[in-house]
Image: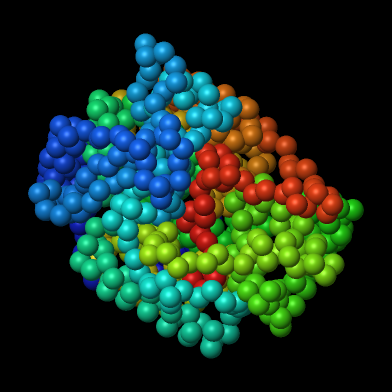
Amino acid sequence: MKALVLSGVVGSLVLTSLAIPPGRALDAPPSEMGGTLIAARRAAAEGIRFTTCPAEEKLPPHITCGTVRVPVDYADPDGASIPLTVSRVEASGPAADRQGALVYNPGGPGASSTFFPLAAELPAWKRISAAYDLVGYAPRGVGRSAPVSCQDPADRATGPTPAPTHPSEVFKRERIARAKTYAQGCATRTGTALRHYHSLNNARDLEVLRAALDEPKLTYMGASYGTYFGALYATLFPHRVRRMVFDAPVDPAPRQVWYVNNLDQSPAFERRWADFRTWVAGHDKVYGLGTTAREVQASYEKVRVELAASPAGGKVGQGQLHAAMLDVGYHDGFWALRANALSRYLKGDPKPLIEQAAPAPETSPDAGNGRAVYTAVECNDAPWPEDFAVWDRDNTRLAETAPFETWDNAWLNLPCAYWKAPRQMPLDVRTGPGVLPPVLILAAERDAATPYEGALELQRRLWGSALVTERDAGTHGIGGGPNACVNGYLETYLLTGAVPGGTPVRRASCAPHPEPDPVSLERRAELRPPSDLPGQGVTARPLAGPSPSS
């Protein structure tokens, strides 16, 4: 990854975590580490009472739910607490073969994994779910786990919006004003607790959850952002790690978190957008959008221009179109779906595009919760440039060669320039020989949301870790997906603890899963997006997403 230089970060920072030397097992002020120990002991004594899941979780009756309480502030473990929603399906195999609980986090920040027990029904997870209880949960701030809010649902834009790839000065000023309003809304609506929604506390919460599940050591799988605070956990609590899987890993280097990581997504998304256009061009007989990637781009630009003048159904403008098209960068399961929508629109039928891109009605109290948690965690986690001139310079340069995602991502993250809460200083994720048992890293070589260089960096930092690469592929989150080779390594590791390759550098690679089959226009009604399960598109816009207006 060619990281852009982070410069122009100014302002006073309140540092609430301390860096550690390589090889140290613990990193936190004694009060916060002590608070974690107190909370974990309390959770171990209380356990989790699993009963019928609340109707809001929309889970079948064989999956049960409970709660575990974690401190809002680990420096005050006897103060206010947050109930985290936990879901579970028990291992289906013989009791003698049970290996404990497998806890999963899909990333975000801002995503819940309470759906994860449903993976037990998938073929790729059958042997794993026979050995493990599959456990999901809603992290702090998410869903019913003391939800964070930054905006009244009534204030969320639902009409068609613009999404210029090269914004004017007037448009930039308008987005600056929105970012300031949103940041202020987070501070006003969440209050003094806002500062405690960050990745270090997510890692500490994971330790409390482990204790509440009565697991001596943690078996954990995280995707995307879930790999970041999983790596924090491995650094803070290496003696509590049994097995860990990091799928589509974030680059954990402190210099990357989070401003530079977000900048690095732009060229990666541009590359993946080109992959999509090349695939569409190869199936011109089906879609009629052009025989070259350049011609497909021209077809896309034609749709953008028409939607700017006349939004489809009065709902889908450039912003909604672009937000929908970002999905092709995350998962190639969206390729036929989106290509079909563009094709039908240009042939006079806007219905598929409206169905895929129109904003869903958001009138519930938790509307916008995912974005609120995303913003709180990323803004709290690290320093950000506080002068828009830095953002303007870096993103203007990027947009010259990578216009597809650059400014969209900038607008999503811009509230961090005007954040009201104190910042953390990123922990130096690092373990030395013998500190951590072998962990497994899974990565697609052309991943856009978490570029492949991050997987290499994580492997360098977690001594003895093994990296499995899906070559020439870019789906974000590959464990449990369509690649049998990847799934073989995942299953072997979770069931036996064995990792591929030899020391000191443990690596293996898999050929890419097949590209999606084109779907004819006559079969368009049969199109379905990937499901929200591991390896099926579960990571749900981690670390990037639609602009605030979309």
Residue 184 lies left or right of residue 541; in this view the side is left
- Tell me which corner region of the image, top left, top right, bottom left or bottom right, holds residue 424: bottom left
Q: Position of residue 62 (x, y in %)?
A: 43, 31
Tell me what residue is drawn at x 48 percent, y 53 percent: 542
Tell me what residue is drawn at x 48 percent, y 85 percent: 173
Vertical placement of residue 434 versus 410, above or below: above
Whether residue 229 appears in this view of the structure is no
Residue 124 lies left or right of residue 102; in this view the side is right
Tell me what residue is drawn at x 72 percent, y 61 percent: 352
Vertical placement of residue 391 versus 203, above or below: below
Vertical placement of residue 491 versus 455, above or below: above
Q: Position of residue 333 (x, y in %)?
A: 67, 46
Residue 8 lies left or right of residue 265; in this view the side is left
Tell which of 389 and 319 is nearer to you: 319
Tell me what residue is drawn at x 28 percent, y 56 percent: 146
Residue 429 lies left or right of residue 58; in this view the side is left
